[in-house]
Image: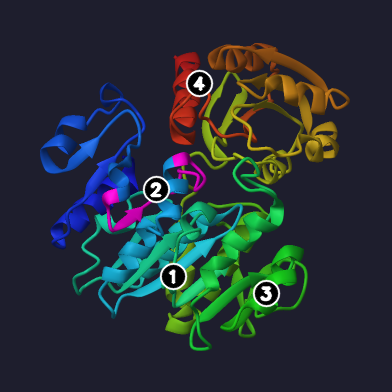
Amino acid sequence: MAKSGIAVAYKAKKMGLEPFVSEFKKENQINYSQEIRKNFKCEFGGHSEKLLDCDLLIVSPGIPLDIPILKKAKMKNLKFISEIEFGYKIKYPASKIIAITGSNGKSTTVSLIHHILKTAGYKSILAGNIGSAFTSFPIEKPGIEFIVLELSSFQLELIEFFKADVAAILNITPDHLNRYNNFEEYTLAKFNIFNNQTENDLAIFNLDDNICLKYQNTVKSNKKFFSLKNNADIFFNGKNIVHNSRDISVQNLLIKGPHNIANIMASILALSPFHLKIEIINKALRTFSPLPHRLEFVAEVNGIKFINDSKATNTESVKYALQSFPKPIRIIMGGAGKGEDYTVLNPLLKQYAKKIYLVGESRLEMEQAFKSTTDIALFNVFKRAVLAAYSDAEKGDYVVLSPACTSYDMFNNFEERGDRFKAIVHELKK
């Protein structure tokens, strides 16, 4: 009964179907339960066998496919699809889909693509794993020229006919290993994004990513590549982005760092079939702001700069954070783990971290992983970790929240965690 589940229930009802909504949480844990009761047949506090009387199950992306009720549904040969698949089935045929997945950089890339399209005057929506659910928009009606989707591996598990005109995998690094049996299973879920593409569609890959290269031969569509290191369809020469023998400057942009140059290149390639003017792209690049919770500058308090990188829920994202500042940082880490090997951060922590402040469920595991790197302090309470980092800091230091974990042990989502961090910093500033 989360965002996509509610959106698809309303859309299904509007299309003349009869939704039944099932929620594991108790009714008093759902703020909008009365509204759901008024509009739908529903159940709270567990998934009953009433679900087995349905013709089709639309499973929210956060639900593992091996829970008991879904095992029973499989035995009955009930069909499962995702909200993304349902949206694809009903969308207006002329609307173009640009779909982006990857372990890191998805949100920035889809937001930039959407921003470029809007700058060019197109009617575009941004949906999926960012902002509003796909089916919350009037996608069945004419008028939406582009649908830009951020898709997680969870959302891609249950697609059947879904097809994007342009699809991209930005990178693949270990993530969500608490959900998948192994890294290959996670990778193959990502590669579902290309399943139904034909040679008339565009598939985009990162030439610098060995996993992308390993599996790209399984893809039937027209392929293009971006690279920070090598010649490709679009590449970075150390100073400018080069595309179609034309230089695109990355100077004076609001988004910084090599990872964002990669995101920009993927965005430009994704829009290449639609022949946008380079002047429009340059204007959009200059006016695009960094997203909240992604290396977001919060405030400077007594000469100490605070950075909110709450979206860094895996080790790869933390690598970017550690390398993004002019001097070693005080880093706040921890939360609910996803089965990653935290020791992969040790070389960078030794080089770029002054001190590590650990909080949340994973703090003891992280302490063991990082014990040979630098000073470490452990906390039970999030606010105490932030205040301790401030208390230890000297003028000119950076205090960076970059957790390498999800937030679900202490917060509802990474946004709430980031907002709490910002609130604590603003209290300090006052």
Tag 3: residue type? Gln
What span is in magenta? Answer: 53-68
Between circles 3 and 1, the one closer to the viewer is 3
Circle nearer the viewer, 3 or 4: 3
Q: Is residue 41 magenta?
A: no
Q: Quadrant of the N terminus?
A: top left
In the rendered structure, the answer to whether residue 258 lies left or right of residue 192 reads right
Q: CA distance from mark 3 to mark 1?
A: 18 Å
- Whichever of callouts 4 and 1 sits on the residue coming sooner in the sequence is 1
Q: Earlier in the sequence, mark 3 or mark 4?
A: 3
Q: Which residue is mark 4?
A: 425
Toward the viewer: 213 or 46? Answer: 46
Mark 1 belongs to which amino acid? Ile
Q: Nearer the viewer, residue 259 or 430?
A: 259
**Spatial separation of the CA atoms under disc 3 and disc 4:** 44 Å
Q: Earlier in the sequence, mark 1 or mark 2?
A: 2
State left or right for residue 172 relative to residue 19: right
Q: How many marks?
A: 4
Residue 298, given in percent of the width and then of the height, sits at: 51, 31
Residue to which mark 1 is pinned: 98
Which residue is at a point 85% across and 38% down the rendered structure image? 347
Residue under numbered circle 2:
60
Disc 1 and disc 2 in contact, CB within 8 angstroms: no
* Cβ atoms at labels 3 and 1 below 8 Å apart: no
Is 313 placed above or below 419 here? below
Where the C terminus falls, by quadrant?
A: top left
